[in-house]
Amino acid sequence: MSSADTPLPAVAPEVLAEAVENLTARLRKKLDAVTASCAAAAVREPDGRVGIRFGEDAVVTLRPGPEGTLTRAEQAVCSCLLAPRCLHRAAALGAAPLADTPLADTPLTDTPLADTPPAEALPVGAPPVPGEPARPRGPGTPPGPETPAPPERALTGAQTAAATALWEAAAEALAAGVTAGGAVVQAELLRAAHTARLAALPRAEAAALRVVRGLRAARERQAAQRLGDLTEAFRELLYTTALLASGSTDPALTGTSRRAYAPGGSLRVYGLCREPVLSATGYGGVVTHLLAPDGARYSVADVRPGGLARARGAGSASVALGGAALDHAGLARGGLRIAGATVSPEGRLGAGRGVKATPLPGTSWSDAPAAALFARPAAEAVADGLASQDGAEPALLGCDVAVVGAAGEHLLVREARPDGPLLRLRAAHPHPELPHADNLRRLAGHPGLRIRVLGRPDLDRAATLRPLAVGPVPGADHTLRLPEEWLGRADLGYDRLQGQHLPPAGPTSDTTPDTAPAAAPAPAGPDPLADSPLWRVRRLLETGVAGGRRAVAESARDADHRSGYGPLRRAGFTAAADCAAALAAEADRRPRDAFGRLGDPSAEGYARAWLAAAAHLSAAERSLVAASWASPPLT
């Protein structure tokens, strides 16, 4: 049973770390085997307690607090004579899912953040994820040009020490890999992460928690876990802690525990679109994106526990902002005049007591201020985003395109400009209960259709856009025909395109989505990222994450693997080949003492070599992504 399905209550990371730290070396060796059977033996009582029996003489009782989380050591007790320093108690806590840390400033992978979301509910894209070294991505929007940058402050000695300890724990975890990254390795990371939290380094703590969750999911073979995601999480953690340990004063590295809302004065904002939010930790909701007349971007979020049901329902929920009598559907196509506004650094509008909001009529995408989003080539907007990205979610961009057809799960379109590139539209959220994918499939059945697209570029894939909303192209005949009340756009995560919204195309023009004919596959053309030999470097990095240092060392002794650097050099990726060779050599290095005896290799040296290869790979891939947006049309 995976931790995601267990009846066990969530446990605070520091409580689990302390329990494992109190075990003797002999008991630590048995911890993984005992932990594996705990979830299946857990029994939840009507009063909320959870009991786990170990043989005839030991029962662990977990008593979560009012929020359903174990936040104190005394909430987990065992009846055996060794308690609380016993194997049973540590195993029960190790089988429980990790609790979210609401104050952590964590990136989220493809979904926007809430005002006070949990660690895993935040986007980066993030990071995340998703490829900036940190992906602390808020879907959010950059603050206005007059917003001052946060001042740089020197790190304290406690912060530097905490970052150094977390770097060392991360290096050991990387050297162990998934195969050896069991409960003891994870507990060391959690202990160091808690120290980072106490030292006011929430970004480093959040990165460590993502690595621990990724290790757990990989060891449990959860279907949703991707090795690439864990590789990115390791890169974020090592990158952040290495710079912090060196004394870097970049405010983006330390992160913020809470989003500080500053006075924003009087604002006029107009709706662009709605975006559903659905996180892996059960949070759901909506983010409505807004635009001011001066081009500054803002958003209003409503994200709470509730998962898919809440993500679907929040799109028409009331907007809790200054008493405005609007729901999110109305705000996405309307506007607000706000007095006493409060704004976070990401452009999130707060709902403080002094905020007053009055509805305004909406504006079309063809009119100011939204028209400016569609006035410049998409390649320029992506290039600016890549140049200025500091880990934030890429800003929304707009472009007019012509539908080419379906290519697997993607929709191929060509930007409607001279020498416009072929772009891939990828569902912003793949959940089958959200209409993103269905809407793209319907559009794919109308080659030549002209549409206006508003979305977020996927900076991890070549020429890929995640569309949030579409609308008709002004002046075009073969384009969308949306209801007047939709104000010229359809939110792909909430509105469902029907036959009457599309131009006539013969007898099948008014079919429903369930009976629409399948779109003919379109030629996708070459992918400069997927077709480059850089995949060899990524495979080496992922080999290290999966099998640890030993797996990379074994690959270094493989002649076929070493010969793989040749294609890299012939393609001009000389530095990438050098980084891969240096990583393999470091993994296989075994120092000897003065008597010629083999010693333990340094995990830190290996981690530095791995991080160098990962950082170079990220930069090279981003360069290819930028070039793919500027490429001429493929024939």
Image (cartoon, rainbow, N blue to C red):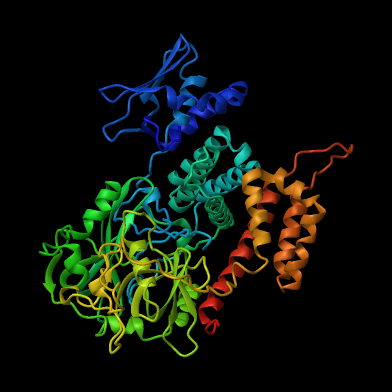
**Above/below status of 598 relative to 155:** above
Q: Which residue ends up furthest to the front in the rendered image?
A: 507
Q: Residue at x 28, y 46 (%)?
A: 305
Residue 462 on image: x %, y %: 53, 71
Q: Residue at x 63, y 56 (%)?
A: 611
Q: Quadrant of residue 287?
A: bottom left
Residue 265 on image: x %, y %: 20, 72
**520 or 253, which is in the foreground?**
520
Q: Which residue ends up furthest to the top in the rendered image?
A: 56
Taking the image as shown, residue 596 lies to the left or right of residue 490, namely right
Q: Quadrant of residue 7?
A: top left
Taking the image as shown, residue 592 lies to the left or right of residue 255, namely right
Taking the image as shown, residue 628 lies to the left or right of residue 325, namely right
Q: Is residue 351 visible?
A: no
Count of numbered badges drawn on the protein: 0
Q: Residue at x 52, y 62 (%)?
A: 131
**Above/below status of 233 relative to 248:** above
The N terminus appears in which quarter of the rendering?
A: top left
Residue 38 on image: x %, y %: 46, 25
Taking the image as shown, residue 361 lies to the left or right of residue 451, namely left
The C terminus appears in which quarter of the rendering?
A: bottom right
Residue 21 on image: x %, y %: 53, 29
Q: Is residue 357 visible?
A: yes
